Amino acid sequence: MIRMNDVTMVYDNGTRAVNKANLRVDEGEFVFLVGASGSGKTTIIKLLTAEVRPTEGRVLVNNYNVGEMKRRQIPYLRRTLGVVYQDFRLIKNKTVYENVAFAMRTIGAKSKAIKERVPYVLELVGLADKAQIKPMNLSGGEQQRVAIARALVNNPRLIIADEPTGNLDPARSLELMTLFEKINELGTTVLIVTHEKGLVDEFEKRVVMIDKGEVVSDQTGGYYQL
Amino acid sequence: MRSFGYYWKEGFRNIFKHGFMSIAAVLIMIACLLLTGTVTLIAYNIDLSIEELQQSNEIVVFIDESLTTREARALGSEFNKIDNIATVEFEDRDVALEKYREELGEDAVILDNYNSANNPLRNSFIFTLKDPTLAEETIKQIDAVEGTDYIRADEDVISKLIQVQRVFNIIALAMVVGLAVISIFIIANTVKLAMFARREEISIQKMVGATNWFIRWPFVIEGMVLGLLAGGLAFLAQWGMYSELANIASGVIPYFHIVPFDGLRWLVLGIYLGAGVLFGIGGSVTSIRKFMNV
């Protein structure tokens, strides 16, 4: 699923965002990636989604070698992933249904498959009755659930969520984490980047802590150690 | 192939969805095509008129008096061998005398004592040239033909016309190239503005695993349709403008020969549609490139 071996990532301006990091995530796991702002969490996400390439070391995601793959292979790696961002990244002038269907259409899915799959995923995230509403008319929590539905719709092997509760109140955050837990129970691997100690502690999952670009602790059933 | 219908649907949907930007892009393309096209057509007509003036500038060769009219006429075959001569016309000295009488009208009495026996005029040839820039060389070749006595050619006028044409061509080319560059710049920026509004959509497509061509195709189709529309409308506007300008020009300068639009119609249509499609597709594809690097 995910293999990072001695990975270093240095940006063009000289910033060393990741430093000799090692990480292994297996099929079906639920992992929290935690750390303070600027610790290198987002760069790790960018490495996993091939937005950036490692300066040193090897990054393997769903059998794709991010450092060595050709540019034209990147879309095929991304089709094996579902990514959820803090700012939702929904298309404002499309309805909830269209936003989710858009992800399927983009990879060339047939109309029939779209008509079957989208209602199922919206049902899963609890938005079946909001299918024809535009994102602007939804609450933050609901918008994030649309983003999760979109991430799930292409049946990815791995869901990566970058600070998915960053814009939500504690009650909505808890609901969302419960949804991720449910998705994980259905067989999808989940990697959540967060710095919300309360949430991490609440779920007692595997916690990988990053500091200054290095993995400083990795505990299953662990807590967020400050 | 499954996505082919989707590309067209998306292309057309984008045109209507971003209606204001589509109209702006089409109007700007029309303005640029019209401006560049009008200057090109005016330049083409002026160039053609200068060429006509050069070609209508005749060279007259008077034949040695010792040659009979038959011998003089036979020289025509020698002159025909000279490459740069476009037309050769023989003028019989007796015909020339009659013409002169007609020209003089009432004053023709002064020629009353002249007839074919004591005709003071000579047999002559009147030439027009294929390439007036080679006039000097051609005159030398004519002069070398045995029986040629005297050549009357307005070399100065020819060379001045050639100079005028050269300067005009440089000015016209500079204007057309300048306008084309400005047009491309304006069109590219208009399209870029339209693309900027859709950068979020493009980044989401990239994020969920769309290939570059999957993202690009609807934009290519959109650019092509808008380009064709702009080219077609610009052609119709050009047609109307050209006819109006031709009417005005022929009223103001009666000797200025203007090529009828009918003769240029298909060429102008082809160029406008081609340029429209090129600007449309080129503008779209180059503008989305920077949003694709995600």
Image (cartoon, rainbow, N blue to C red):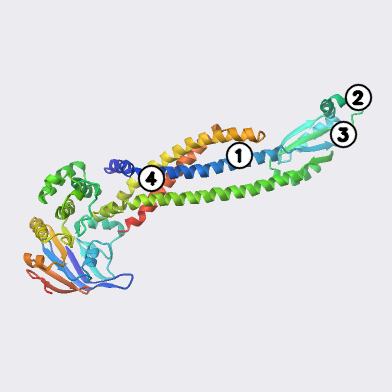
- Vertical order, A116 against B66 (above or below): below
- Residue B127 picture location, percent across and down: 75, 37
- Residue B86 picture location, percent across and down: 70, 37
Callouts 1 and 2 close, C-beta under 8 Å: no
| N-terminal label among 4 and 1 | 1
Query: Nearer the viewer's eye, disc 2 or disc 3?
Result: 2
- Label 2 crowd bin: few (<14), some (14–19), many (20+), radius 10 Å: few
The residue shown at (69%, 48%) is: B163
The residue shown at (11%, 68%) is: A197
| N-terminal label among 4 and 2 | 2
| N-terminal label among 2 and 3 | 3
Measure the alpha-carbon separation of dots 1 and 2: 47 Å
Measure the alpha-carbon separation of dots 2 and 3: 25 Å
- Label 1 crowd bin: few (<14), some (14–19), many (20+), radius 10 Å: some
Question: Where does label 2 land, which residue?
Answer: B112
Chain of the residue under label 1 = B
Query: Nearer the viewer's eye, disc 1 or disc 3?
Result: 1
| N-terminal label among 1 and 3 | 1
Question: Where does label 1 land, which residue?
Answer: B45
Confirm whether residue B259 shows in the render: no
Chain of the residue under label 2 = B
Asked where in the image residue A49 lies, by quadrant, the reply is bottom left
- Residue A23 picture location, percent across and down: 17, 69
Determine if marks 4 and 1 fall on one subunit.
yes
Question: Where does label 3 land, which residue?
Answer: B67
Measure the alpha-carbon separation of dots 1 and 3: 44 Å
The kind of secondary structure element at disc 3 is loop
Q: Which mark is residue B223?
A: 4
Query: Nearer the viewer's eye, disc 3 or disc 4?
Result: 4
